[in-house]
Amino acid sequence: MAFSTLQIAEFIRIFSLRGQNIAWFTGAGASVAAGLPSAYDMTWDFKRSIFCTEQNTPISQFSNLTPGVKSKIQAYFDSKRATNDPNSPPPEYSLEEYSIVIPLFCTSL
């Protein structure tokens, strides 16, 4: 299979005419390289937001997610974890952390 390279002007013209037929193939990390937050970063942002909302604390007090701040936030989530409750926050670095923290974030808004 051969691939060709387009000049930017040609790409813009084609995209405006047939954008719905264009697929993007990117590798892992492409979003981070483009300046978008990683799932890890988003998980900490969500945890910070939940923590501040539930503690009635301005998010500005936790604007920098330093190791000490993360430790305090994680201790809060660890204290809320119930052994058999499927809605409990998972342990830090759990494979389910991202998929569980997002719904927690959405319900805390």
Image (cartoon, rainbow, N blue to C red):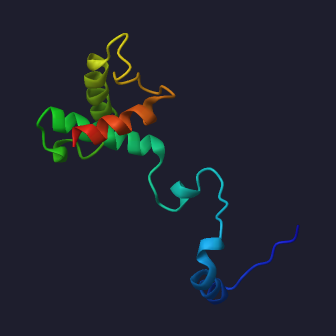
Quadrant in the picture for the C terminus: top left
Residue 66 visible, this angle? no
Depth check, front residue: 22 or 81: 22
Q: How many marks?
A: 0
State left or right for residue 70 relative to residue 3.
left
The residue furthest right is 1
Q: Position of residue 77 (x, y in %)?
A: 29, 24
Instruction: Tell me which residue sits at (33%, 43%) in the image.
Output: 45
Q: Position of residue 30 (x, y in %)?
A: 59, 57
Instruction: Tell me which residue sits at (35%, 15%) in the image.
Output: 85
State left or right for residue 30 relative to residue 4.
left
Instruction: Tell me which residue sits at (58%, 52%) in the image.
Output: 29
Q: Position of residue 86 (x, y in %)?
A: 38, 19
Instruction: Tell me which residue sits at (12%, 38%) in the image.
Output: 57
Q: Is residue 27 above or below residue 45?
A: below
Residue 11 falls in image quadrant: bottom right
Quadrant in the picture for the N terminus: bottom right
Depth check, front residue: 86 or 69: 86
Q: Position of residue 60 (x, y in %)?
A: 17, 48
